[in-house]
Amino acid sequence: MIPHHILVFISFLEKFHFIKVFDPEYIETQRQALYIKKEYANSGMEEFTEDETGSFCSYLSEGCRLCQEGAKMVLFVTGLCPKNCFYCPLSDERRGKDLIFANERPVENDEDLLEEAGLMDAFGTGITGGEPLLKIERVLHYIRLLKSAFGTEHHIHLYTSLAPDRQLLEKLADAGLDEIRLHPPQENWWNLKHSPYADALKNAKKLGIEAGIEIPALEGAEKVAVFAEEMDVFLNLNELEFSDNNSEALLKSGFSLESDISSAAAGSCKYAEAAFSACKRAHFCSSTYKDAVQLRKRFQRIAKNTARKFDDITEDGTLVYGVIECGDQKLAEKILQDMEVPSELFEVKEGRIEIAWWVLEDIKEEIKEELEPYEARLSVIERYPFEGGMVVETIYLNNDRLLEEDDQP
Ligand code: SF4
């Protein structure tokens, strides 16, 4: 028979939001789309791979390969941007603000950046924004900093919606930039051949920077694919996604949500299919892939370095542990010592004791009895694997059953 605490834990795991994206109906829709895309496998591409999240590719740049392993740190260098793309996914907290983030961590100084890279054991960094090249000195500084701290093999790619000239590209190449992805705004897609983007791609290649184009899968993507093929560069297509700030504009442009459990825009992947028939080195990155795989793998890497002995690391890279909060913390500590709970299985923090969830599950009745006059609150928490990481779920322990937050009076 499965022990009670394991059953409790399984029910806890079933509540993880990541599991929802593996909903059978949703996967079936994705699969059907993939069968259509397979037709393009016979159109001259040497390789064509697909996965269960709806992503497919005939080519993966080194930056994408590392990103798929969850080994790329995302370095957001500024929220400033001269463009005004209707699909821009930036949040109000970042858009138009000159802020720096390494993954989700605000960067105040170089140490913050290096610490975050070390924490996730990053093999590379993707520099993004806003428009990174508005802060060119900052970008050059970070490329040099990361290369000198983690070695030249630390792979760095950069997104830009601008077409950098030869002089600027030389500076980036000298600093050590490995890969550049140009993101021309949609209004340019029909005439890229005679635009500065063509020169930028040619120059980047001459300087030894791997060059490509990265755009959302939208009307006109096939024109960009033809251009990418002519320029002999790779093409990345991102599935268009609804976010808080672009949903109105996306609806106005005729897009709708693909399903209740996905933020992908229905129909976006059709534009990718058309583009795949025109470009041999292409990659379509699905919205589900970003959420369910990239993020999860990044969390797993971080969790390995941040989990305490008593934290349970889930398959999604989140941490699960128990929490004791009560009016007399000294007494709670003493009870744990009297019960001979090994000191490595709990940690005393300000206003709370964090403890192995399975230990708390075993001793909760005794603890509650002794701490009853002090309004003790016992819970099991799942949170993102970094300091101050978002709490995904809290389950309160009450009498001999578990109550979810919503059940609380
Ligand atoms: S270039 Fe990027 S950051 Fe700037 S508006 Fe367009 S999508 Fe947003």
Image (cartoon, helix red, strand yellow):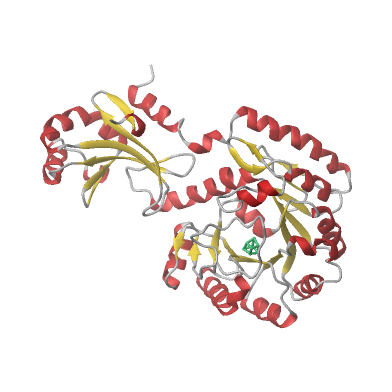
Which image quadrant is residue 361 in? top left
Q: List the single residue furthest toward the bottom.
A: 167
398 vs 66, left or right, is: left
Q: Quadrant of the C terminus?
A: top left
Q: How many marks?
A: 0
Q: Residue at x 57, y 80 (%)?
A: 137
Quarter of the displayed picture in which ligand 1 can be seen: bottom right
Which image quadrant is residue 362 in? top left
121 vs 337, left or right, is: right
Q: In terms of depth relative to the viewer, which is nearer, 196 or 335?
A: 196
| Residue 291 x %, y % | 57, 45
| Residue 59 x %, y % | 76, 53
Q: In terms of depth relative to the viewer, which is nearer, 202 or 253?
A: 253
Which image quadrant is residue 363 in? top left
Q: Residue at x 65, y 52 (%)?
A: 249
| Residue 379 x %, y % | 29, 36
Q: List the single residue furthest toward the top.
A: 1
| Residue 203 x %, y % | 78, 75
378 vs 63, left or right, is: left
347 vs 321, left or right, is: left
* Camera sees residue 200: yes
Q: Residue at x 79, y 54 (%)?
A: 221
Q: In terms of depth relative to the viewer, which is nearer, 270 or 144?
A: 270
Q: Quadrant of the N terminus?
A: top left
Q: Eyeballing the image, is 2 above or below 355?
A: above
* Camera sees residue 239: no
Q: Eyeballing the image, is 247 above or below 156?
A: above
